[in-house]
Amino acid sequence: MSTAPNPADPNSFNHRFVRIPTTKHVYHVVDQAPLHHRGDLADAPTLLLCHGFPDLWCGWRYREMCGMADVIGFPACASPHSHLASTPSQQLRCTVAPLLHHCNRTEIHAFAARGWRVICPSQLGYGLSSSPSDPSHYSYKTVSYDLNLLLTELGVPGQVILLGHDWGGMIAWRFTNYFPHRVKAIISVCTPYQSPANSKTPIISDEELIRKYRPNFGYQLAFKKPEMAIKLDQVGDLFLESMHSARFRRRPKEAKPEGSEMGSWVQEGRLEKSVDRQIEQRRQGKLPKPDPEPELDFYLSTFSKTGFAGCLNWYKTRSINQLEEVASNLSPTFPPHIPALQLPAALDAALPPEMCLAPAVLKCFPGGNLEVRVLQTADHWCLSDEKERDKVTGILCEWIEIVLAGKWKPTGNAIANL
């Protein structure tokens, strides 16, 4: 049974480091045992949560950990800036604790409290995980194989329920393509399914693909440029504030800096112009640092140590993914026996619901095992948005309960608006 950690001992928390024997990548993992579970941990239902960009393991905090501070006794640090601790264990104690201390206390009934084991790695290139410079390390296949071995190293012999958001959503989909025997069910928040490439898939540049077919991915062309990491390192606090600050989200649009909202910079060229403008304004002393805010401070302290170079490698992998998928001869259709739930957000400018609802996507599920629920009032950050997260948590928990109870049935690729 899961017991309360010793508040004086940061090593008693469920933060682990796992070295993948094949790639030698080291992953920082939050491995939260289910509360009140008796018996072998390998027998507990296990959830694998995959975050995206520019996020961290704590992007899922309102699901696996929020409220757990009240239940299992997380310590509080004297200052949200105590992340300057020198050792990994001190760093974990002084960065995780203040973040969780400020979580919404009504979220006690999250995943771990429901008796599920929660495994949430910091993705490659993020936080305390490895950050190789070669983009090939970040391919869907490489990361999927890493996660498969990570589960083995953590003593998970059987199936998991996969949850992914943003890039984590694509990893969840591809993990299922590469390792269908490992997946009991899958939930993708915002990210649509995309059929694996095959020998007939045309080889075109990212520029041509985006300009002809995916203008909402225009910002990705900026993320591919080597100088973009350097630029974001200069104004990364403002970039992260626009996504992870509850206070920023509450501001009226006219009170936000020009070009700072996600919907305004997805088109090609706009993001880079916005970042360049912020760099110049900061040089002139016109842009102060964001005000202290516990949850935002956690992101700022983490990215200030790692920079953006590693995580931007995810945007440089499309051609690598295509070649690996063709060579792997993956099925063009999704495994018909695996329950799948997509939660697109109606206000998501980068991943609009139309991508999830496209006929080309729906035909990949001939077994009718896909269910799409469109979050009508949500945007890309629905997992942490204080107006949406309770609803999203409820949807996730209810659907997972149905799957685990053996009551799930194919819906015929049903679509609902919520």
Image (spheres, grey):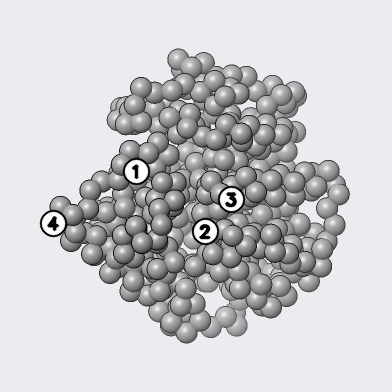
Nearer to us of marks 1 and 2 is 2
- Crowding near pointer 3: few (<14 within 10 Å), some, many (20+)? some
Amino acid marked by disc 2: His
Q: Quadrant of residue 68?
A: top right
Res 312 quadrant in image: bottom left
Q: Which residue is mark 2?
A: 380
| Residue at 75% in and 46% down | 398
Please state the horizontal and vertical placement of residue 123, each as a whole percent of the image: 48, 48
- Residue highlighted by disc 3: 388
**Which of the two discs, 1 and 3, sits closer to the camera?**
3
Query: Looking at the image, is mark 4 or mark 1 earlier in the sequence?
Result: 4
Mark nearest the camera among 3 and 2 is 3
Residue annotated with mark 1: 300
How far apart marks 1 and 2 lie (CA) works out to 19 Å
The local secondary structure at tag 4 comes to: loop
Q: CA distance from mark 4 to mark 2?
A: 32 Å
Circle 4 residue: 284
